[in-house]
Image: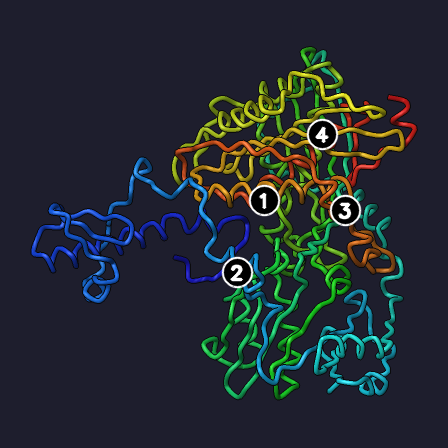
Amino acid sequence: MPSTLATSGSDSVADGWVPLRTAGATARAMLLSAAAAKWGVPVSALRTEPGTVIDASGRRLAYTELLADAARLPVPTGVPLKAQADYRLLGTSVVKVDARDISEGRAQYGIDVHIPGMLYAAVARPPHASCAARSADERTARAVDGVRDVVRIPTGIAVIADSTWAALRGRDALGATWDDAACAGLDSASMWKTLSHALDGGGRVTRTTGTPSQTPAGHVAMSAEYRYPFQAHVAMEPLNATVRVTPGRIDVWAGTQRANVVRAEIAKRAGLREDDVHVNVLLTGGAFGRRIARDFILEAYEIARHVDAPVKSVWSREDDVAHDAYQPAAVHRMSALVDHSGFPSVWRHATASFHLSMFGPFDPKSADVWDGEPWAGHDLPYAFASHQARFAPVAAPVSTGAWRSVEYPGGVFARESFVDEVAHRFGTDPLALRMRAIPSPGVVQRRSGPVPNGDRLRDVLRLAAERAAWSSPAPVRAGRRSGRGIACNSYFGTAMTATVADVSVGDAGDVRVHRVVCATDAGQIINESGLRAQIEGGIVWGLSTALRDEITFARGRAQQRNFNGFRVLRMPECPQIDVVLVRSPLRPYGVGESAVPPAMAAVANAVRAATGVAPRSLPIRVARREVRAS
């Protein structure tokens, strides 16, 4: 297994698949050897059942009886792994070992940590990193019952108290004000203008296939621009971390996606060896990329080093939304030259987006800034005669970071919406156009060998369309216009996903999603219930973005503060979700992110089908006049 304790990119299962199987097979081989030695029989005469070694006569030894002997044996190498035909558990639905603890409130999340003598902290932070403190009434804050101290730290002013409530009240009593003159013009309008200007400047070509020397005769030129807004993570468990600093040792309790990096960074700040920093990784009530960043943990360390006690730093929901590492906004310009049959021969996808500051300062000379960043433009699943992806990265004006599917959602929304616009222009069925454009078998070389990704994507499209009754009209709903939309995506050429959405639009422009069908091929299924839950969660996440969510800015501040302004999908709004899974012989791939982007695009395409007007920005807003005109 890798030495780094980390998770991101839906890679945990894919990366751990072979090492964990190897560990299990090796342990089994050692248990068999121990039993063979005890009974004086060859290993070939033995077999195993769950927890037991059995010989030809039916004698049994429990694994627990063999552990001590097996542990003294040399660890074998090159142990053969179980064939797929012999799997008993893989591909079935298995209850999580901690499911009962989670459902009954016994599971320990970061926010549940309690250490004797622990204090609590809340931090007053500037609305933007460029804002300096103007004033703060520390005397009044210290007078709040339960407040122990007020300390200045690099990210703001921390109030330390006997309880979270006292810390938050003390922070309010500070009445901290900030000089925001430096970001007076930093608003959403200026950010959109910055992205448009970056695209006007050209950017850099990141992928080219085919190079037609001139415009093909008789082709129709089409173009469209799509906008994707900033997004917040809003995990159910707000950010928190507990840190205890003692001479020569630091202990950390937190939910984090980068435990080893946390240890290294705190050790560097404290001037200690990494072995002197102990990170206790706890369950997280949602992460979605936000806990790749270490800001909330490093901030807790900066507070704790001022105090002779463990300190838990807790962010409120308002802190979480106002100081997120936002998914960056992006502008996508699509263009195509389409032949008389309605099939594009030339396809262009240009993207401008803010870079991910979570991973370091913006450096336009760095290969990491350019290497396939506009993923949905770069990873085009369609085979057009000529394809070009262009990218214009821009320095982030606010904190930005990884979010579910990272660069895919906006790009897939643009690409799949434009595919539908082409189909609509030429009276072509959107499913048929996609099927025609996806190469068959579409073989690509991956680490595991050649993979027919084209046929896999075609297969999930077919499955989703069949389950959703694509060839039938969308259900009629009284007083509303109904539409059905489809979209697909190849997530890094691994998990293949196709989504169909049934929506209706009322006279006031309100959009309701009634049903979503999602077909996925993610390779070998490990735990079917977990896989379905990941896909369902990804769909709900994508629908929230399509219909409700965006972060806007004024004077460098996020204008949304809580769920009343950043409205994730509520339970009564959740549609019927139907998940279709492909039983695949391939190695397993991650699915924590693959269902998010096509859900957005399928809803947008369904709205176009219902109203005749294609949404070109998210969240989708349908004008009353557009509904009537349609």
**Left of 257 or right of it: where is 500?**
right
Quick one: SS at disc 3? loop
Do tag 2 and tag 1 residues touch (Cβ < 8 Å)? no
Residue nearest the observer in this picture, 616 or 245: 245
Apparent side of residue 131 relative to residue 434 in the rendered image (left or right):
right
| Residue closest to the far right | 625
Tag nearer the camera, 1 or 4:
1
Q: CA distance from mark 3 to mark 2?
A: 32 Å
Discs 3, 1 touching: Cβ within 8 Å? no
Pointer 4 residue: 417
Q: Amino acid at mark 2?
A: Asp
**Of the residues tagged 4 and 3, which is closer to the observer?**
3
List the residue tagged with mark 1: 593
| Residue 159 x %, y % | 75, 80
The kind of residue on which mark 1 rests is Glu
Please tell me how crowded label 3 is: few (under 14), some (14-19), or many (20+) other residues with Cα within 10 Å.
many
